[in-house]
Image: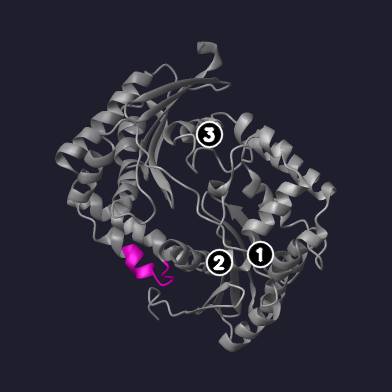
């Protein structure tokens, strides 16, 4: 069976819930994956972190499922589950033996339809404390932990949906009320704002009957509007120095890039891989191994529904020059901009990318999430082949082009320095 020939059936319930069914050759396993079309990009100023907090709240029980029992029921059935919040969406997913499909659908439908009936101030206060501790551990008290927040707030305008991190600010998290949570649920956790994917070894008609049984009577709310956006563009280079409790200097460069599935996105992703994805990649080999001036170096391109950015970061070795690290990064970019890369270099990177892409398809929960993602961004769940083709058809000129087109523009430079250097 061709792993890229993805057969599926897509339909909607009268209440607007979208359902996508895919029969996958995975003996005795099924994945259930729900995307709610809301993430931190949809939050209002003063309410940052609400989407992520709500992800936590969805595991605190619903009318027929006591607190924390969602985990207990799925794990006792031999399955696994989790959830995540991003800028553009929040997803909830389970992978379990096929004969427990009904259990997963019942659990997801109960919190979609009957979450508010079990909401209490005690549960909210508990999860606010959990999220605040997560914020402190991952951001405020983590070495270099505030870099992400500083990058977002400087590369995206103040009124852009990506201006602040998904975790939210401590003040905003502390301020959330039951009314905030209730309003958020009614606005975004509607069947018409959700997409349910069932993938794996199951019978189509049985799955349809179960979806009808558990989801059809959940009332629909109005579909929320998309957040407003503006073009991301820096008119000049921006610089910022942040002093922190760190041992080594670190430097970041961020450029505005493109939205998801833009024509240039694949080239930007491949460029990041060529720069830092392996020990033999351009920047890693040069800065870490040959010149030994950097402890590590990384590059990546982020693209979302409402914008994107390209970033390079490097941690400077003790007693080495942060200016030299910066100069060498820009020298390497200029080499690519002027002469591009070699065909052999690109081919090796393509092969590694394809290997990782194909491997991800072997994981049923990953495949179900990819189906939901393709539908969300492209309205085409079976985009596996087309997505991979974006990368395999790239040529060296494409990478040269994106360096000139995006990485020659004004950028934001962040330096995180040890407090002793203040």
Q: Is residue 248 above or below residue 42?
A: above
- The answer to whether residue 101 is above or below residue 298 is below
Of label 1 and label 2, which has the lower sequence position? 1
Q: Residue at x 72, y 42 (%)?
A: 176
Q: Position of residue 362 (x, y in %)?
A: 48, 69
In the picture, measured across the screen, residue 372 lies left or right of residue 121, that is: left
Looking at the image, residue 297 sits to the left or right of residue 342; the answer is: right
- Indicate which disc residue 80 carries: 1
Tell me, for residue 171, which label it has, or none.
none
- Residues marked 3 and 1 touching at CB (< 8 Å): no
Q: Are marks 2 and 3 in contact (CB under 8 Å)?
A: no
**Residue 371 visible within the image:** yes
Label 3 neighbourhood size at 10 Å, few (<14), some (14-19), many (20+)?
some
Residue for badge 2: 365
Instruction: State if disc 2 and disc 1 touch (CB < 8 Å).
Output: yes
Other-residue count near label 1 (Cα within 10 Å), few / some / many at <14 / 14–19 / ≥20: some
| Secondary structure of residue under mark 2 | helix
Distance between the alpha carbons at the discs numbered 1 and 2: 10 Å
Q: Residue at x 35, y 61 (%)?
A: 354
What residue is shown with label 3? 149
């Amino acid at each position: 069976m061709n792993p890229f020939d993805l057969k599926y059936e897509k339909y909607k319930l009268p209440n607007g819930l979208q359902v996508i069914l895919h029969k996958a050759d995975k003996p005795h396993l099924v994945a259930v994956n729900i995307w709610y079309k809301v993430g931190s990009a949809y939050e209002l100023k003063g309410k940052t972190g609400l989407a992520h907090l709500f992800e936590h709240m969805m595991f605190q029980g619903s009318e027929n499922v006591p607190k924390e029992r969602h985990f207990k029921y799925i794990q006792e059935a031999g399955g696994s589950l989790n959830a995540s919040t991003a800028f553009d969406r929040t997803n909830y997913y389970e992978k379990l033996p096929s004969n427990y499909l009904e259990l997963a659908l019942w659990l997801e439908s109960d919190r979609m339809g009957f979450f508010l009936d079990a909401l209490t101030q005690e549960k909210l206060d508990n999860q606010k404390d959990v999220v605040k501790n997560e914020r402190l551990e991952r951001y405020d008290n983590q070495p270099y932990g505030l870099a992400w927040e500083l990058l977002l707030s400087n590369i995206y305008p103040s009124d852009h949906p990506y201006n602040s991190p998904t975790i939210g600010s401590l003040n905003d998290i502390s301020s959330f009320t039951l009314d905030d949570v209730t309003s958020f649920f009614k606005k975004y956790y509607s069947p018409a704002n959700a997409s349910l994917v069932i993938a794996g070894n199951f019978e189509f008609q049985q799955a349809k009957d179960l979806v009808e049984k558990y989801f059809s009577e959940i009332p629909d709310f109005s579909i929320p509007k998309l957040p407003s956006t503006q073009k991301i563009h820096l008119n000049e280079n921006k610089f910022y120095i942040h002093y922190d409790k760190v041992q080594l200097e670190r430097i970041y460069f961020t450029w505005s890039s493109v939205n998801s599935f833009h024509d240039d996105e694949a080239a930007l992703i491949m460029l990041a891989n060529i720069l830092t994805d392996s020990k033999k990649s351009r920047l890693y080999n040069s800065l870490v191994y040959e010149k030994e001036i950097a402890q590590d170096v990384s590059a990546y391109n982020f693209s979302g529904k409402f914008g994107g950015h390209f970033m390079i970061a490097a941690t400077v070795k003790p007693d080495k020059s942060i200016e030299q690290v910066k100069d060498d990064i820009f020298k390497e970019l200029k080499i690519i901009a002027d002469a591009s890369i070699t065909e052999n270099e690109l081919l090796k990177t393509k092969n590694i990318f394809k290997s990782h892409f194909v491997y991800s398809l072997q994981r049923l929960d990953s495949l179900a999430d990819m189906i939901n993602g393709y539908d969300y961004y492209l309205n085409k769940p079976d985009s596996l082949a087309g997505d991979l083709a974006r990368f395999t058809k790239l040529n060296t000129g494409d990478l040269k082009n994106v360096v000139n087109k995006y990485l020659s523009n004004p950028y934001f430079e962040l330096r995180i320095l040890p407090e002793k250097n203040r």
